[in-house]
Image (cartoon, coloured by chain):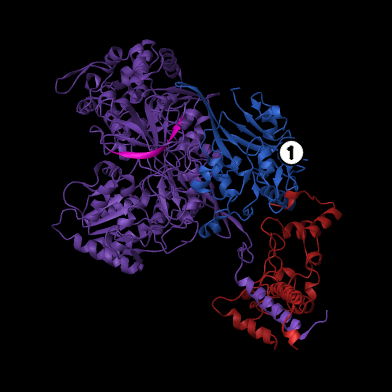
Chain colours: A blue, B purple, C red
Amino acid sequence: MARWGMVIDLDKCNGCQACEVACRSENNIAVGGPQAASEHRTISWMQVRAEVEGEWPDIRSRFVPQPCMHCDRPPCTLVCPVQATSIDREGIVNQIYARCIGCRYCANACPYTVKFFNWHKPDHPASTEPGLNPDVSVRPVGVIEKCTFCSHRLQKAREMARVETRPLREQDFTTACADSCPTGAIVFGNLDDPTHRVAELSRDPRAFRLQEGLGTEPKVYYLSRRD
Amino acid sequence: MAITRRSFLVGAAGAGIGFGLGALSHQFPLASPHVGPDWAPNDETFVASTCLLCPAHCGIRVRLIDGRPVRIDGNPLHPVSQGGLCPKGRAGLQLLYHPSRLKGPLVRVGPPGSDEFKPIGWNAALDRVASALSSASQPGGATPVEWMVGDVSGVCGDLVAGFCGVLGTTRVSVDDYRDGSADLLGMCQGIATAPAFDLAGADMVLSFGAALSEAWWSPLHAARARDAEVAGRSARWVQVDTRLSRTAVGAHQFVAIRPGTFGALALGLTYVIVKEGLYDADLVARQVAGWEDWTGADGTPHVGYRTLVLRHGRSDEVSARTGVPVATLTALAKQFGGARRGVAVWDQGVAWRSGGMADALAIHALNTLTGRLGRRGGLLVQGPMPGLPGPAEQKAPGAVDLASAPLTATSWPAAGSDPKVLFLYHANPVASLPDPDTARQALARVPLVVSFSPFFDESARCAHLILPDHTYLERWQDALAPAAVPSPVWGVVRPVVKPLVNTRATGDVILGLATRMGGSAAAWARWKSVEDLVHERGLSLAGAGRGSAFVDRFRQRELGEVEGRGWWLPHGQKPEEFWQTIVDSGGWFDPLIDYEDGASRSQLPDGRVWMFPAEARARLSKSGRALAEGFLPIDESLEARDGGPRDFPLQLIPFRVMTLASGGTPLMPWLLEHLGALNGSAWETWIEIGPETARSEGLQSGQRVRVESSRGRFEATVRVSPGAQPGVVSVPYGLHSRVEGWGEPNGANPLSAVGRAVDPVSGLPDWQSTRVRVVRI
Amino acid sequence: MNVDEKLGPTRRLALGALTVLMAVAGFAAGRVTFNPNGAVVQPIQFNHRKHVKDAGLDCSTCHQYYADHQHSGLPDLALCTGCHQQPMTKSPEEAKLIKLATTAAPPAFRKLFRLPDHAYYSHRRHVTLAGLPCTTCHGAIAETTAPPPGPLVQVVMKTCLDCHARRNVPTNCIACHR
């Protein structure tokens, strides 16, 4: 069984944010606007954060693109009272919008702050509706949403593989962010399949994960020459 | 209790009324359900085209579901962007589906300055413009028609230029991002085009403030090249910059430098390279002029650059001036001198400053000295594009050339008579110029202002007629790759979707106007449409005897090798087949980068590449700045402007952001949601200051402030960042334009404080000589 | 009957409560009966039995997409006129069809199943790959002589899950939710 994961090479990321916009386009993420931004309520499943340290002129800096970590031991699923979020058998931490009651326990439990609550009715002006991706549902107000590792693509990819009576190949299923990265910094695949690039990269000496001490066992690995 | 007649009747009446209300209740739903079309096959298709949102012109591949565009990706076959696409290119979808797009042509009904417009038919609108043009272009009138254009390329630029020829006007101003490097190459090498940088072949890229990962000529070319393996090891990218820019974060090394001292650093690097003997002395002796002392044709003796470098480039002096430690400077010079395939790059960050040409000359001298001209991984000149037929085919003397037309930012409105008709094409002067009122007044003086904007932007509001253009996803056009990439690419822009509203391609409108005017104008407009014109160009490429439709990377290399041996494999038997392959793949390119053609060495009569040629020295000496020797990039006057540091203690440096556009394009909400990745800014103009400046000025992150100079002011939100240098206020440019109706940012135009400063030497804007103070509001 | 005309407070309250109760019940009944989504009205009284059983047409003649698409597809009236260009019978519905098909915007057949956006169902996956017969979800639609106002088989999430469990097919959430 697959164990989907991601490796992000921080030495390659140049902070262009193509992944953020590709994710918004792929996953029908609504525009929050200035109001949401000022309340820190902008929804962005993928966020390029910048780490800037030091004092002028000796600055150390890097970009850290941050999607949901899809933890193997996710804290968010433990607190959900209605099992609207759970870890899938292939390691994807899902969010079932129709089940979510909007209690926001999971958003508070997440140490990576990558679960987003729809405080307002998602704003998709009528003229933009033809541009929505029909493969992803539009969320209603009052539910949590999050990065799904583009699991809707997995649904289609798996079906296509069966149509063509072949196993699922590495290039069949990838996320919109990995697809969009012009420097190839984001790699997606099956961590348990040694033929997949992520399996090799996740064992790279440069590899680390965010807040490893919490024991959440994230499946998003980062590569960096710096500690 | 028995059921009485009364209780039965009352109950039945209640039930009846309730039933009726229940039945009616569906007419007044409490929450409207998400009802799409009843069903759709959801058929997925992909169409290749070219992005027109910035001059890079990357290849795009649009995902369509049942014919509706739902995602824009990079075209993997495109030789430059290779499947990559910046966030702005992806957000083009929001331009197409923007709720505030104009639904059709509009005519002013209210007084000038009011927002009162009413719809008008296309024929009536065109008739009105054509008759105004006919009466305006009567002989005797001095240039009664004027054009103001933004980033237009390919046939659309040529149509404007050709139409100007037909109308007998040369009055055109352009809003583009030229950085003066074509001017510089003209003086040094006799080549009148901007240089190309072979970033993908370079093992060291030394960028002097060039926004390679941001608003550079082709950020995707740079993104693809940065991690390239060159000669078995990964390339080293060094960013010298005045602030911790995105490019600086993404580079392998960031070298902090004081504003306005890029050229001084280049001088200092040259000094070390000379002292260490790290340059190609033999090559310099054979091919370079201006290095040793020389005597001009008029007998004037000139001091060679070598002597000047040894005189002014001492490491301790340069270090004190630039703020770059001597050790860093020395190490950098040794790295660059020792690199096998290094290249020094600069852009507007260097050139858009009074005296910036001196800095660019010093940086270019580094490339010349170390023998990087025309070499793999060095500075090249883009191979020639086969001649394309079109409306500006014959270059008559005095004909309009958009590439050298005056910049709107520095020259508009021109002094003297006002035009009778003014066309605004991808131009929004009211928002993009420092002083909106001047722009509005100038527009109000013109009897007929025609805007082609697809949006009701600030300048369209001042027009008499708005003839909205299609978006680039709905029309035909072609687009050349910028000069900064090594080989020519001709991208085809094709409609990926039928026009969503009653708009019309401006190219077709121009042809229609010419036809209506009759006579020589009608004869000039011999094409049915822009599509016809692009088709004709595509067919002509079949006869070029080189190049190919876009192919995958392996095939690209293969074709390049084949062409290098003098062979050519046409990808179609008949011209129509050739054309169809070009359209399907997204465009045409020449796979061969010929490093041996000598195109980038020198085309001057003496066959030599000049360092600080006499012409440049003479021009710089008139800069009005206290430059060392009159022309060296050592400026003694930086602190002395605007009444000195007491009134205006800080230096303002506007920078350009990849996702923000110049004038014409409205802002896409996806891009505004996370605008400043480095400091978390969104939806508003911010200023970056360092912690030291914040302390001395008593400012904190998140405060709203007014930035004031002697010329003007703008408002912004403070972001304190360790990546900002003491005494400097950096501000993003590009949030000045807004379109009502969706995602309106709280933006400001920093040029309000910069004013109309122009570098007299290059004619380019001077963005970096403004002193300001920051006032809390 | 003076006593009855002046009601006591208890009776008055009871009568009021009854009225409200009846009004609520009536409201619910009215809402259900006149639910525009509840009953699907088709433009033509299409007779499945005649086309499938008598004429021997294959499902894919009209539902062109079921084998390799998510949706099965519904025919537009233009497809009908492929056979019914000239009247083949004396049916008044056929006459209506021929008349409707020539209008500028012919009405379309409407689907019976309303799948929420957040669930992924693919005919290709269930019919072509898993080999389920149409009747599993569509019941005896082929036997009908007039279009039914709603699905013949009520499919809810439990229907899916039960079937998946019986056939040992994944029941994880994101196999279907999206």
Could you tell whether C69 is left or right of B160 in the image? right
- Residue at the limit of the structure toward the right, as seen here: C166
* Nearer-the-camera pick, C21 or A7: C21
Q: Is residue B123 left or right of residue A78?
A: left
Quarter assignment of residue B351? top left
> Where residue C104 sits: x, y (%)?
54, 77
Would you say residue C149 is visible in this rendering? no
Examine the image and state in which quarter residue B696 appears: top left
Type of amino acid under label 1: Arg
Q: Secondary structure at mark 1?
A: loop
| Residue under the point 19% across and 55% down | B144
Q: Main secondary structure of the magenta part?
A: strand
Judging depth in this view, the residue of B735 and B484 nearest the camera is: B735
Residue bearing the label numbered 1: A3
Asked whether, in this view, residue C7 is left or right of residue B438, the answer is: right
Left or right relative to B636: residue B69: right
Image quarter of residue B197: top left
Taking the magenta stretch, the answer to whether it contains residue B713 is yes
- Give the camera-side residue of C34 and B297: C34
Query: Where does residue B216 sit, x and y in percent of width and height?
Result: 42, 36
> Residue B313, relative to residue B547: is it above or below?
above
Residue B608 position in % (x across, y down): 29, 25
Magenta region: which residues?
B712-720
User: Between residues C172 and C139, which one lies in front from this camera angle?
Assistant: C172
